[in-house]
Amino acid sequence: MTMNEWARNQQERRRRFDDEARSCKLKPPEAFSDEPAPPEAYRNLCPDLDPALTGRRSHVVRWRIARSCCGWAEPPTTEEFYDAFHTDTPDQRQKSIIYMWGTEATFTELFEAWAQHAYTFRDLVRALHLADFPWPDRIAEINQWADPHHSEQ
């Protein structure tokens, strides 16, 4: 295969993935587990972390906020993050926090926040829906975690 053929193949593969991702819609929250992380998930993903740095004080959330919100006039706290992911009517600041997390958190950080009881996967998806989260590549990743037996009605 020549370099030109390889490049054309890569462009075609990216185009197909981008087309799929662009048409991707976030599945409903009910398609995702509402179970909190079991203790073994916490032990496996966060083996050396102080258990006090969970829930409203999640260590991974604090770390991501420090890296992604340093330019905010008033960076959010981990407590604000937690509240944003557990409210029925997020205000604009809470939507910004949700949007920041959806776009900035790594795949691993999404799981670590779950393991640290910052949210359940259903809480995460519900918050993304309420914030009108638009990023198709992340939506495609998250949709992989849905229950494959859930029927969308």
Image (tube, grey):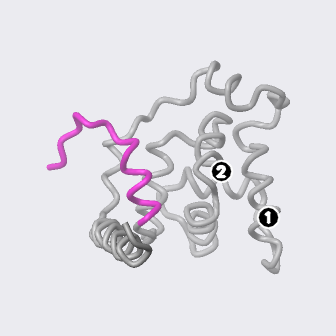
Q: Secondary structure at mark 1?
A: helix
Q: Which mark is residue 67?
A: 1
Q: As displayed, is residue 36 above or below residue 60?
A: above
Mark nearer the viewer, 2 or 1? 1
**Residue closest to the eye, 16 or 56:** 16
Give how far across and how far down residue 83 sits, in percent. Answer: 63, 53
Check the image and name the residue furthest to the front.
2
Q: Which residue is located at x 47 percent, y 61 percent?
A: 138
Residue matched to label 2: 82
**Residue closest to the eye, 9 or 15:** 9
- Residue 132: in magenta span: no
Q: As displayed, is residue 67 above or below residue 124?
A: below
Q: Which residue is located at x 74 percent, y 43 percent?
A: 58
Q: Earlier in the sequence, mark 2 or mark 1?
A: 1
Give how far across and how far down residue 24 sits, in percent. Answer: 30, 64
Check the image and name the residue furthest to the left.
153
Q: Which mark is residue 117?
A: none
**Residue closest to the eye, 3 or 116:** 3
Q: Is residue 39 toward the left or the right of residue 66 in the image?
A: left
Q: Which residue is located at x 80 percent, y 37 percent?
A: 53
* Rendered image quadrant of residue 106: bottom right
Magenta range is 137-153
